[in-house]
């Protein structure tokens, strides 16, 4: 039986030439992806985007571990199933939201637009970005009372290009941009909500499940009245494909 604890960098793959019949992830702050190989070098098992508590009972001679984010990983390998579930001392309660901020995958973006048509604010995921965006919430308000609508689209608004803020002040920039413009001509749209807002009174939308924005698409929240000013704040996570 062997316990391995190590640090892995963002985007790194670690290779372990170690044989066993039992494998378990004891600790990982974020998901990891693994591949297992037999004595002939052929891949005989894999696991994609799994967390601590995941285990495998199968023979292997080598395994690779990939992580999209920098983290500390601890694993247990053995020639047979065995180990301990005992937690001496204190029990650690994992704050999942805090850990995601530490992983640098959480972002907030702000935009404002005035136009003679439908003033819109958009989060745009560029084609080929290599990441999915999971939009969790949006806050919208306008100078005068107006209707609002929320939709996804393959149309990129013309203005803005505003850099979103990583919720980790030292974190990397987002691959997305916050854009603004006239949303009346968006194409290939799919509606996700609509309602009304009073003048200078924001509406906050928190989704029970996030809206997925794949590369080459954006999400737009827009007003309806002419010559209105719409402001919006989006919150989302970015994860590798």
Image: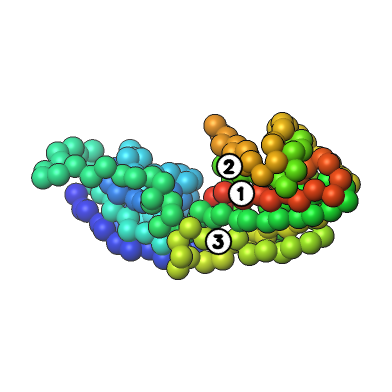
Query: Pointer 1 and pointer 2: residues touching (CB < 8 Å)?
Result: yes
Across and down, in percent, residue 83 comes to 18, 41
Location of residue 210 (image quadrant):
top right
Q: Is residue 173 left or right of residue 41?
A: right
Q: Earlier in the sequence, mark 1 or mark 2?
A: 2
Please state which of residues 88 and 147 is positioned toward the viewer in this rendering: 147
Q: Is residue 180 visible?
A: yes
Q: Earlier in the sequence, mark 3 or mark 1?
A: 3
Q: Distance between the residues labelled 2 and 3?
A: 15 Å
Across and down, in percent, residue 86 comes to 14, 39
Residue identified by numbered label 1: 234
Q: Can residue 217 be seen in this view?
A: no
Secondary structure under tag 1 reads strand
Instruction: Give the colour scheme of this rendering.
Output: rainbow
Residue identified by numbered label 2: 137
Q: How many labels does the image show?
A: 3
Residue 165: mark: 3
Across and down, in percent, residue 170 comes to 45, 68
Q: Is residue 65 left or right of residue 83?
A: right
């Amino acid at each position: 039986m062997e316990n391995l604890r190590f640090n892995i960098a963002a985007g790194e793959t670690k290779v372990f030439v170690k044989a066993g019949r039992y494998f378990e992830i004891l600790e990982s702050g974020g998901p990891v992806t693994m591949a297992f190989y037999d004595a002939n070098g052929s891949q005989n098992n894999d696991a994609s985007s799994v967390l601590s508590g995941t285990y495998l009972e199968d023979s292997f001679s080598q395994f690779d571990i990939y992580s999209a984010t920098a983290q500390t990983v601890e694993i247990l390998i053995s020639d047979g199933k065995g180990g301990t579930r005992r937690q001496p001392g204190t029990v650690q309660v994992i704050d999942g939201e805090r850990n995601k901020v530490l992983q640098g995958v959480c972002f907030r973006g702000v935009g404002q637009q005035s136009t003679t048509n439908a003033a819109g604010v958009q989060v745009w995921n560029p084609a080929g970005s290599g990441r999915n965006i999971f939009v969790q919430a949006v806050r919208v308000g306008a100078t005068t009372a107006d209707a609002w609508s929320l939709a996804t689209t393959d149309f990129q608004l013309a203005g803005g290009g505003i850099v979103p803020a990583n919720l980790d002040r030292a974190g990397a920039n987002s691959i997305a941009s916050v854009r603004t413009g006239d949303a009346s001509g968006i194409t290939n749209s799919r509606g996700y909500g609509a309602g009304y807002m009073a003048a200078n009174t924001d509406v906050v939308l928190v989704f029970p499940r996030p809206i997925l924005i794949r590369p080459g698409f954006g999400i737009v929240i827009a007003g309806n009245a002419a010559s209105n000013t719409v402001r919006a704040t989006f919150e989302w996570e970015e994860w590798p494909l």
